[in-house]
């Protein structure tokens, strides 16, 4: 078979594959929607990617929780430091959600335009599970996007995890992610 006969088919296949990989902008998903899909990737302890049957790719931030930061490579070279327990938090979320069917309840968008989601799998609230098992903090302040009943449940779950010394609470004084991010900004990292 001649090379010229193969190329058109190969390029057509490549474009079809790319068509399936192009994400619909996540901000097209509105607050108040519940979207079903499969978790294809976990980015860290509070962010993951859900692929829906309609080919929407949602980069969901779990609303109401804040997990320890991971180390990240910088565009300029080098890496930003991560927090203790960051990799463990990511693995915990992978164990709960990766390759599983989930429902993401969208409660708004963050400043990066990511949907803020309550994630459900098998009847379990995964945001709550992450805090209950000591893999994340309940977010502080009064974020508008967090449903009031969830905010209360997350606070109680964090208290329970602290008392039981679960996960990151084995460390007698873990640094909250918001304090860590602030410290890194002030240090110019």
Image: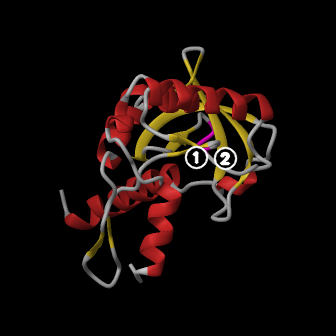
Q: Identify the residue under disc 1.
A: 60
Q: Is disc 1 placed on a helix, strand or loop? A: strand
Residue at the limit of the structure toward the top, as seen here: 123
As measured in the structure, the alpha-carbon distance from the residue carrying label 1 to the one carrying label 2 is 6 Å
Secondary structure, magenta segment, majority class = strand
Q: Quadrant of the N terminus?
A: bottom left
Q: Nearer the viewer, residue 79 or 159?
A: 159
Q: Secondary structure at mark 2?
A: strand
Which part of the image, by quadrant, shows the C terminus?
A: bottom left
**Residue drawn where x is 59% and y is 33% of the image:** 53
Residue hosting label 2: 116
- Residues packed near mark 1 inside 10 Å, few (<14), some (14 to 19) or many (20 plus): many
In the drawing, does residue 96 fall left or right of residue 63? left
User: From this viewpoint, is residue 126 visible?
Assistant: no
Q: Position of residue 59 (x, y in %)?
A: 55, 50
x, y percent for residue 169:
39, 36
Residue 119 visible in the picture: yes
| Residue located at (47% from left, 66% from top) | 181
Task: Tell me the magenta residue range.
Answer: 54-62
């Amino acid at each position: 078979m001649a090379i010229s006969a193969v190329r058109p088919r190969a390029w057509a296949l490549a474009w079809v594959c790319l068509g399936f990989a192009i994400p619909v902008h996540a901000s097209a998903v509105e607050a108040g929607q519940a979207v079903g899909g499969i978790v294809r990737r976990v980015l860290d302890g509070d962010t993951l990617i859900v692929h829906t049957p309609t080919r929407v790719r949602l980069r969901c931030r779990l609303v109401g929780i804040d997990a320890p930061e991971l180390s990240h490579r910088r565009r300029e070279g080098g890496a930003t430091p991560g927090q203790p327990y960051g990799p463990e938090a990511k693995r915990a979320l992978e164990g709960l959600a990766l390759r599983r069917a989930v429902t993401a309840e969208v409660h708004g968008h963050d400043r990066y335009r990511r949907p803020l989601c309550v994630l459900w799998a098998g009847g379990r609230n995964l945001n709550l599970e992450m805090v209950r098992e000591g893999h994340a903090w309940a977010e502080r302040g009064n974020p508008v996007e967090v449903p009031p009943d969830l905010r209360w449940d997350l606070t109680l779950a964090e208290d329970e995890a602290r008392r039981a010394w679960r996960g990151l609470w084995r460390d007698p004084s873990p640094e909250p992610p918001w304090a860590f991010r602030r410290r890194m900004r002030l240090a110019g990292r």
